[in-house]
Amino acid sequence: MSDRPRLLPLLGATRHGARDAMTCQYRCGNACDHPVPNRSDNPYFGDLVDVEVSRRGVVRAGAAGALVLGFGGAVAGALAGAAPAAAAPAVPGAGEAAAPAGGVGSGALTFRPIPPNKLDTLVVPNGYDHAVVIKWGDPVVPGAPAFDVHAQTAAAQAKQFGYNNDFVGVLPIDRKRALLVVNHEYTNEDLMFPGFTGQDALSVEQVRVAMAAHGMSVVELERVDATGQWRPVRTGRRQYNRRVTALATKFELTGPAAGSAWLRTAADPKGRTVVGTLNNCAGGVTPWGTVLSGEENFNQYFVGGDGAPEELKPKLARYGIPTDVRHPSGSRKWERADERFDLAKHPNEAHRFGWVVEIDPFDPESRPRKHTALGRVKHEGANVIVAKDGRVVAYMGDDERFDYLYKFVSDKKFMPGNSWVARKHNLTLLESGTLYVAALEGNSAAEIDGTGKLPSDGAFDGRGRWIKLVSGNRSYVDGMTAADVLTFTRLAGDKVGATKMDRPEDVEPSQLTGKVYVALTNNTDRGKAAKAAADEANPRNVNKHGQILELVEDGGDNTAETFAWSLPIVCGDPADPSTHFAGYDKTRVSPISCPDNVAFDAIGNLWISTDGNALGSNDGLFATAVEGPERGHLKQFLTVPLGAETCGPFITKDNRSVFVAVQHPGEITGASVENPASTWPDGDFAKPGVVVTWRLDGGPVGS
């Protein structure tokens, strides 16, 4: 008998797949309604060097055996602990999860998958519980005022938990305490301000509130008794707590492009200090205990592209900033509060966003940094692994239709340990190195017809190479300096013939195997007139559901310049012949659509969160083994409330806690504070928040 839950009919007003029009507006500035920024004619596959071608007992949610948790209003709950899955330092006193008998990444996931649903609540499997850790408006900085939706101020919001949480990282302090670090990607003024009638009607103070609600939060957590539940600390100094905002936080620029002419402005003639961070999406936890954050859809915050210097307009357009007065940008109206967002007056300001940000959560007085050596794109995030020779490698995706996959290899080597000398050294690792872009080639190219039909060899797979763009101050791209390459990295990728991908979002290496996994979310423009057709790495035209790419560096060396690749998962309804789940019996697989973020548990299983489910269900979190007989047995672990997307995720190193960020609950066209489409989590109006889930018996999650 099949244990695959049935699909639900698609509900709600949507566009561009299943994402609501309201989300399209606020999340990315309706990017799909604008021309694809990548108009290069480079091939999809470059020439290769080596072508080898739970509240207990609440409500049961159906045959799949799940508990529906948090009806009406879940109370604020817990925060994290134990070591981050992506970080090398061990958790003091925490037990390591044992590797499964079948090997790393081959652990059987024993929870019964939950069914697809459209419930306005969080749903997790039987035997699990969950709690809201923190939500929009909750106090972060000591002295923060109580949240009042009718009396919001920028000064208050700068001390409170921001809006639309995305990336979640948990860094241990000891057995009982940890630091939660969260990105706040964007704001939705429709759902923030009572009486909202449009961006033009916002007061300047309300614009400043929105600016303060962007950025990041650092929150100290404590474990609840001996469970997998965590919550903000209730006593003590909370000396680590911090808000980073788009309004006032200063960032230091590092690397070869820092101080270049492209980054200088009237307010910063040296080109080394930026105020604020924008549209922070995913990120990563480094082996030296810092957090990386990716600046993504920054283009929508700027106006005046039509008034920028003529020689700059093609560069702005490649990043999605309109340069024609007939297509105005800047739907946020931030220039009303700060004129630097008007490019006619400050044409270089846009170049100061789109970087990978590094923050040290253990030093609240430290200045966050933007690392120019990692290039400037619409960064989903960055995830780091220590290579065999001790250098660190950061993998990154550029989240746009037909854009590219990147990696950075440091010049310096990682220094183990927690000494002051080691920490000071490791904080410089991302300031110098070599930046690459990926080119892929399939080994069954002639058989790819855009339907998703598997080639005769039974796999979508092939070979690839990393094309060198820049190393230190040396450019490898004709006609571009190192500063040019790093500031306009998309243009450099165009010139060298990088492979255009279906929205490469989160890219994460397994810390146990070194293999790299890429969430390719979707691309409904694939194969349309005058657009590139399907290829073996992106095998479906009008790709609504996305795929997972597995990349294996040659020799198991993450610094290698060649690799093998395959698609273990081609997403969608398993009953659809165009889907693929590593050859696993598809009658036993959960349907999945639009993979966004990926993470690993302590034994190497892959966890996948979704954004924009085009199959009619709420978004959710899924898990699968990546090795052994259970490889491809994808199972749905949770769903988020109505209108929300699943962000994060993060599994603590003791495998006892799963964190997710519930982003934009109730973000459905026509919704407002007074007329919410979702009342999660408090039963009044929608508030984004972070949730932790744990097993009731205290055992490891998933298994």
Image (cartoon, rainbow, N blue to C red):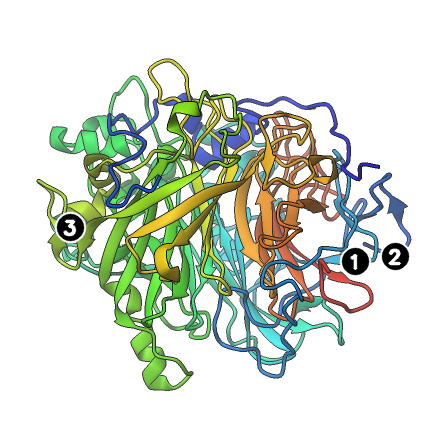
Give yes or no for contact between labels 2 and 1 (Cβ–Cβ under 8 Å): yes
Q: Indicate the amino acid at tag 1.
A: Asp
Asked if residue 147 shows in the view, the reply is no
Name the kind of residue labelled 3 in the image: Ala
Q: Nearer the viewer, residue 432 or 662?
A: 432
Mark 2 and mark 3 lie on one chain; the one further toward the N terminus is: 2
Task: Give the structural element (helix, strand or loop) at label 1.
Answer: strand
Q: Amino acid at mark 2?
A: Arg
Residue at x 65% of width, y 28% of height: 615
x then y, percent, for residue 336: 35, 37
Secondary structure of the residue carrying numbered label 3: helix
Q: Work out whether residue 577 or residue 406 is closer to the camera in this orientation and state it.
A: 577
Seen at 83% across and 53% down, the residue is: 126
Q: What residue would you read off at disc 1?
A: 129
Tell me if 673 is positioned left or right of 460 in this view. right
Identify the secondary structure beneath mark 2.
loop
| Number of numbered discs on residues | 3
Q: Is residue 41 left or right of residue 288?
A: left
Marks 1/3 in contact by CB < 8 Å: the verdict is no
Residue tagged 2: 56
Q: Which residue is mark 3?
A: 483
